Image (cartoon, grey):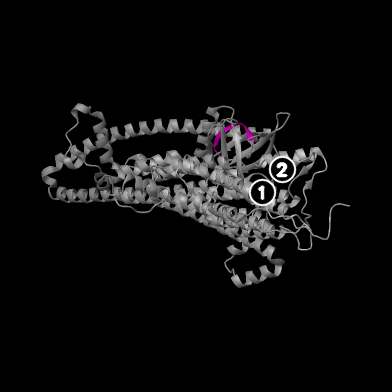
Amino acid sequence: MKEFDDFNFSVDKYTKELTRECVGGSDLQQRKKEIEAYNEQTSATLKQTCKKNYMQFIQTAKEISRELHLTIVFLFLSIISVSITDLESEMYQLSHILIEQRNILATMTDGKTNSHLNAADSVEAAESSAAVATEDVENSHATRAVKEMVQGFNGNLEGKTFLNEGALIELDGNDYRPIQRVFFFLFNDVLIVCKVKHDKRLEFLTEYDPKKIAVINIKDLDGVKNAINIITPDGSKIYQSITAAGKTEWIEKLEEAFRFDQQKKSKKGQAPQPPGRAKQQQQQQQQTPEKLPEQSPTDSQPKSLEDETPEWLSTASEELQTLVAQRHFEDAQALIKRTQDFLRVADNKKKLPQAAAIESKVKQQEQKLTNVLIQELSNSHNRNLQIALRAARRPLKILVEMGRSRQASATLLKVCTVSLRVAQREARRNNAEISELFFCDLTQVACDFLSAFEQQPACVSGEYNSHISVEHLLMLSLSALVVWCNAELQYFASQLIKHYLTKGTSLEAVAKCVERVRKPATKLTEIGLDISYHLEGLLRTTLESLIEESKQRLLDAVGRTEESWQPYNLQTKSNLKRLLHELDTLGIDMRAQTTGDTWLNLTQSTLVFVRQFLQLTDYCGCLAKGEALMQSLEQLLRDLFLAQHALKPPSDMAVDPNFVMKNKIFLVDNLLPIAIDKFRQISGRQCETLRELHTKLARQQGAPLPRQRSVYTTDVF
């Protein structure tokens, strides 16, 4: 990246050389990332430099202003002295004695003043020299200790100020597991990190500039206490102190190293004062408070309006920046509210000339805090929805208190979308139940959303008039949640159709799938969210096509097998007993049709149809709980029953017509009423089509036909 610092840098030339050196698009992308990182680093450096120059400019301006004020005072005094000298020269003969006395008094006064000043200067010089000597001794001891104890350190520590030293424990950033023991040496412009070996010796690891690192306080958790997070150019690292006092001391010392140059500049002495003013101040100090002269109104007023600005208000912007960096979001929000309340008073704005500038800086920090909280909320998504919602509660609460409810609600719902869809994807891969999982997660999101925004109806509804009732406001507060639920329901329905309601799915599988979806969906009505109707509408087209497909398949299967039109022989008693038990389970008693030990006085196709039709009635009853599918399901049952009822033996087959009629009468008189009642019990609705069919077929049934006998044959041999 040194080419960018060259004065003769050419973009075209650099681009050509870069494309010539790089091989493939991946290499170019890597170079692009490096250039962008260098751009960000340069921009940050420029910002820091501008801020540093700005602070220096302010300090210089203050010093120039102070020196200029003193120069004007000296000039004014000199002009006065010149005029007095001219006057004295004209009246020399008259005031010669007075001039000599004045000179004598001035000489005596200057001598006393100089003696006092020299004494004060000597005391200050002695104290400062003692402090400097003590500091030099500490620095020399620390420098010698680092050179003797730390293996592998070759840095120069001459002229550096020692601040602190101590042992810490480095922790893993993921699970807070101890990694190694380290030892810190902190100077004003370097932080030396050493590793504590098994033999208690120190091995040099790395060094950092305190002005290029950030210290973040980590709140005590269940697994770790007294920990701090130090963000370095190499990345974020977590260190643990043995005691809470040691942790606090390291935070203070690192911050002191960060502001060391500024503190050193602020320790400059006061500008020299003219002898007249020094003399006046000395006389005022000798006076007691009771003997102080009364000040005039002009003297009691502040010399500048900056003096009226509270100290906490003037440093609010910097304090907010520090609190946000240390993740003390609650304290930052409280400071913002305190500042806004203070500046909201009209009198305070009039007294403070910098009120507009302070308010602008605080608004910028408020926007920065909002962005950080939104980012914190966005990063809280997790495969486990409960963990995601728990992580989102802190930034969500602060955003709501700051009046950023609309942004918070939108971000929260996006986070929930990610967690829901990841959970659904994993459930499908593991062949787990997705319907119960989806609606439970949906209920949990709705409950947390309502608990967070129940006092913020406008967060999801836009502007509203003051005459709107409280009930209407609560309805408006649910609008964003309802829209999000509908969107998630559409996605869930599409995945359900794609993976479970595909073409060729049996009606049994369709009924079970729909039943598993409907049951948990109805539970959402307990929190005032009814999405069952919308779910039925999303699945209606697909279910109708599957019902029509099943009908065609069942009608094609009717009468496909060859039928002898003879009573059905089950060969063994156990087979007959098993069949009767199965039909009892379906709701029909066939014991009246048994003949002998193993016979049923019905055809095999009739028995197969009875079992199939009753099972189909169960499936149709489950699907018919939704009114939209009622007509298709009734048509399916009607057409299938008529197809079986219309079966008849071939014309060339000698069959007893009374036996054929008996099978049809059994279907109408026994099977159809049971199917109608079963459908009503399961679905809760009357199947009017089957009832009309039963009435119609019952009227058409006539008396049994006599068996045809030929006059040319006899049964007697």
- Residue 433: x, y in percent? 64, 44
Q: Which class describes the residues within 10 Å of circle 1: few (<14), some (14-19), or many (20+)? A: some
- Residue 342: x, y in percent? 31, 42
Quarter the N terminus occupies? bottom right
Answer yes or no: do the residues labelled 2 and 1 have beta carbons within 8 Å?
A: yes
Find out whether residue 161 is within the magenta segment.
yes
Q: Residue furthest front?
A: 711
Left or right, 290 with respect to 260, comes to left
- Residue 547: x, y in percent? 62, 57
SS at mark 2 in the image: helix
- The residue lying at 73 percent from left, 29 percent from top is 199
Residue 521 visible? The answer is yes
In depth, the one of 269 and 572 nearer the eye is 572
Left or right, 428 with respect to 399, comes to right
- The residue lying at 28 percent from left, 49 percent from top is 467
**Residue beneath label 1, please?**
666
Label located before the other in sequence (2 or 1): 2
Q: Residue furthest right?
A: 717
Q: Which mark is residue 593?
A: 2
Q: Which class describes the residues within 10 Å of circle 2: few (<14), some (14-19), or many (20+)? A: few
Give the quarter of the image for residue 265: top left
Left or right, 301 with respect to 453, comes to left
The magenta segment: 159-170
Q: Amino acid at mark 1?
A: Phe
- Residue 100: x, y in percent? 18, 39
Query: Most prominent secondary structure in the magenta stretch?
Result: strand
In depth, the one of 428 and 284 nearer the eye is 428
Give the quarter of the image for residue 384: top right
